[in-house]
Image: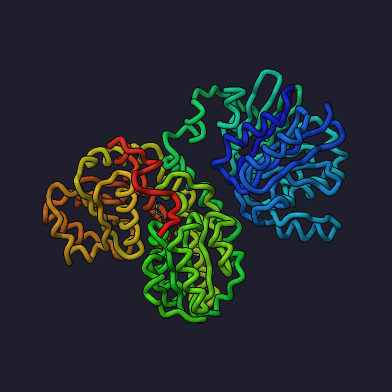
Amino acid sequence: MCGIVGYIGARQAQDVLVSGLGKLEYRGYDSAGVAIQQGGSGGGSIEVRKKAGKLANLAGELAAHPLSGTLGIGHTRWATHGLPNDTNAHPHATEDGKIVIIHNGIIENYLTLKAGLQSRGHVFRSETDSEVLAHLIEEKYNQTGSNLYEAVRLALGEVRGAYGIVVTHADHREIVAARTVSPLVLGVGEGELFLASDVPALLAYTRQVVFLHDGDMVVLGDDGFRVTDLAGNSLQRHIEQIDWDAEAAEKGGYDTYMLKEIYEQPVALTNTLIGRLHDDSGEVNLDINLDPGSFKRISIIACGTAYYAGLVGEYLIEQLARIPVEVDVASEYRYREPLVSEATLAIVISQSGETIDTLEALREAKKFGAKTLGVINAKGSSMTRELDDTLYIHAGPEIGVASTKAYTSMVSAMLMLALWLARARGTLDETRARELLHAARELPRLVEEALAPERVEHIKKVAEKYAHSRDYLFLGRGVNAPTALEGALKLKEISYIHAEGYAAGEMKHGPIALIDADLPVVVIATESRLLEKTISNVQEVRARAGKVIAVLSDGDTENAQHADDVIYVPRAHEMVSPVVNAVAMQLLAYFTAAALGKDVDKPRNLAKSVTVE
Ligand code: AGP
């Protein structure tokens, strides 16, 4: 999830681009770059400047050696393919420097396209998937009699994946852009036009914006803009007036980063799954070098929410790949002298890639010869530099301290890992694999549905009803036992209400003593072969007058009668249901904390990345 901007008008583009990128740096801060057309009216050359690290590095460089010009494009990077460095920073240009592109998203088939282009003599400078676009457009440009719009349109016809792309050419005073999955907004000013991944980058200049739709292309020129679809047909897009203040804008119009990140989950999950599921063969391609047959047991190590994703992973890997798995909180693992050898695969899970307990536990496992794999969000983070291999979840930057989209992307990554191992070790046949791949591919849509306004409004009401409870209990079974733990953690973290998560069957061995008429008990009872067992636990709670908030699958009216309140979630395959159910947990916690007036983005006593023991 990168930040992209573009400008054509009378102002100095450098200033507009740098200030716009400054407003988008929450989307990625691994490197930044700009490309500015020299001279007016397609002056024949484009100057590119790019620097690894925070935007300040590039801004310093430009302050010392400014670039003049009134047409330009700019990018701040969240690395997905290729390490954060100057070469992999955007913009990317063709060898002759004539065509320059910036890209936000993931090109699924970039390796195939790159091989073809190299065989036709193209020389690549970076490790990125994005650079492929520059070379592909160049080929089409030469075939279309130097028509930049047509070249971009034809090139995108060969591309599979997610993109917000902005392109310019040294000989043309125009900018061509397009989007599929990744967001792109057009800003309309007096005799000037702006492009950006998000509204915050535009607000200082205009409040007139056009939200481009999936599959839209747009051409910006001094005489205005035109929107078409990818087939070249003209489209009408109306200009909307934005009335958000700057801070609200950085949150995309949401009150908080946490809520924004909850709503970003459909796109984040798309990016986690993209290019990895091959329904036709029932195979999963994880772009890691690990040999699936090179270990006998797995240790999953993590902290907090990441640890709960590990517990779901344990369930899925043991069920599907039949490999023994143990899951440890990192702060214990590093001192319990675990039984580790070369036959162990140590999997560390982390959003930040910087959590010190997990990093040290990783070093401990390596000390005993374990193979190491990371399931990580932050590219270039400390853990990724010490791991043998990393499976990136591509959830994009997560600003809210309470982890949401990173959790659901981690769980989806663990599902893909379980499927990959199972297929490679022959414990899962093609039919079952296809069924589960299909269920996984459904996740972005199911989560979109779980975020439907009427569902969110209902959860808000339930949250407000119980917001003044002193305690909460969360129960779940099987693959959703960890969902109960995650639900309790989310509530604790941001509302400061004491909450416990338990495997539902374990309740009668102690926690049942907590139950009385003042205790809300959230029971995750979605479609599952353990549903009946879970409902009998609901009965045990009812028998002690506990207030049951049942999370049920759509249409399950029969079990609704056993609950005081019901949260319906979209019906999902049991094996992927922890992702869908987690959204309901996040919203319940969020609206409880909001009802209590808590600062959900910066909860007390917590830090986004815990780098001390
Ligand atoms: C989750 O909401 C918390 N922020 C915390 O438990 C977090 O999951 C834990 O600190 C691990 O962080 P990591 O994923 O960055 O390693």
Q: Position of residue 427 (x, y in %)?
A: 48, 77
Farthest residue, direction front: 64
In which quadrant is the C terminus drawn?
bottom left
Q: Position of residue 514 (x, y in %)?
A: 15, 56
Q: How is the image coloured?
A: rainbow
The quadrant in which residue 483 appears is bottom left
Q: Nearer the viewer, residue 233 or 428?
A: 428
The quadrant in which residue 469 appears is top left
Q: Position of residue 307 (x, y in %)?
A: 40, 62
Q: Position of residue 245 (x, y in %)?
A: 49, 25
Which quadrant of the figure shows ligand 1? Answer: bottom left
Q: Work out whether 133 lies above or below 350.
A: above
Rendered residue at 68%/52% (across/down):
85
Q: Is residue 231 left or right of residue 594?
A: right
Rendered residue at 86%/31% (across/down):
43
Counting labels gives: 0
Residue 439 visible from this viewpoint: no
Q: Work out whether 595 lies above or below 526.
A: above
Rendered residue at 67%/44% (across/down):
103
Rendered residue at 60%/28% (across/down):
202
The quadrant in which residue 454 appears is top left
Q: Nearer the viewer, residue 566 or 432?
A: 566
Residue 525 visible from this viewpoint: yes
Q: Is residue 576 left or right of residue 166?
A: left
Q: Is residue 350 left or right of residue 218?
A: left
